[in-house]
Image: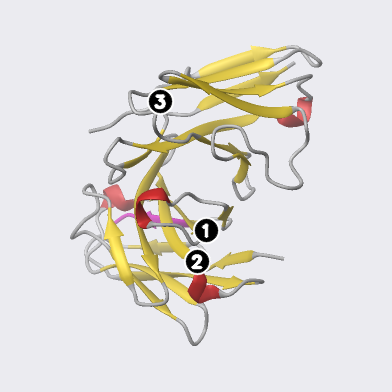
Amino acid sequence: SYELTQPPSVSVSPGQAARITCSGDALPKKYAYWYQLKSGQAPVLVIYDDNKRPSGIPERFSGSSSGTMATLTITGALVEDEADYYCYSRDNSGDSVVFGGGTKLTVL
Amino acid sequence: EVQLVQSGAEVKKPGESLKISCKGSGYIFTNYWIGWVRQMPGKGLEWMGIIHPSDSRARYSPSFQGLVTLSVDTATSTAYLQWSSLRASDTATFYCVRSPPVDVTSVYPDYWGPGTRVTVAS
């Protein structure tokens, strides 16, 4: 079955850039999506189609994809950005949809 | 404003049946896919399946095929996830999600409900 691999944790100081990666064999041909999960809140889409930002998402969130790796970058991370982040994509056939294992972002 | 309002937390015993709901508002319910995502305690997100309200066309993840049933009621703009016989391993939080009106091979969640916590214990 298809898998997306993320680092379990990333830690940065406030104001630094946080980069969270997501690797998968089909990413050269399939879009990556990124979600923010905070305890007690509904998850939020922060990046779609590799690098597009939904309305209402701060400009400090950006996405990129190159080869088999997609990256979520938070430029100038804030304490309020502490959350779990998940990537989402599909295999080359489009039939198998998966989430990455999630990355816990700590900003302190 | 798009909203997905989910039913409240449930505590059930193994072998019992359950149907949880997700009511969409703020958009044309029959134009968008509704999917379901599981998060077991302390674990990551798992895609369960998706259904299109216009014709109840559903596609299940292989891991959930035959274990759950997706359905919709367009009269009330509500989607349902149901089990006929719960197991302790079904203990999890279940999120409903909306996907834009794309081909089923391109679906992705753009809005999420707050989740329904289901606890199955004897």
Q: Are marks 1 and 3 on the same chain?
A: no
Is A72 situated above or below B90?
Answer: above
Q: Secondary structure at mark 1?
A: loop
Identity, as a three-letter code, of the amino acid under mark 2: Tyr
B68 horizontally vs B26: left or right: left
Mark 1 chain: B
Marks 3 and 2 sit apart, C-alpha to C-alpha, by: 27 Å
Q: Amino acid at mark 1?
A: Pro
Q: Position of residue A95 (x, y in %)?
A: 28, 46
Q: Is residue A82 visible?
A: no
Looking at the picture, do discs 1 and 2 lie on one chain? Answer: yes
Pointer 2 local density, CA inside 10 Å: few below 14, some 14–19, many at least 20: some
Q: Please report, as a chain letter, where disc 2 is located.
A: B
> A84 left or right of B54?
right
> The residue under label 3 is which amino acid type?
Pro
**Could you say whether the residue bearing mark 3 is in a helix, strand or loop?**
loop
- Any magenta on residue B120? yes
- Residue assigned mark 1: B100
Dot in front, 3 or 2: 3
Q: Are marks 1 and 3 in contact (CB under 8 Å)?
A: no
Q: Is residue B98 visible?
A: yes
User: Which quadrant, please, contains the N terminus of chain B?
Assistant: bottom right
Q: Tell me the CA gap for discs 1 and 2.
A: 5 Å
Mark number for residue A28?
3
Mark 1 closeness class: few <14, some 14–19, many ≥20 residues within 10 Å:
some
Q: Does the CB distance between marks 1 and 2 fall below 8 Å? A: yes
Please give the residue where the numbered disc 2 appears in the rendered image. B32
Tell me where the magenta segment starts and ends, as one range: B117-122
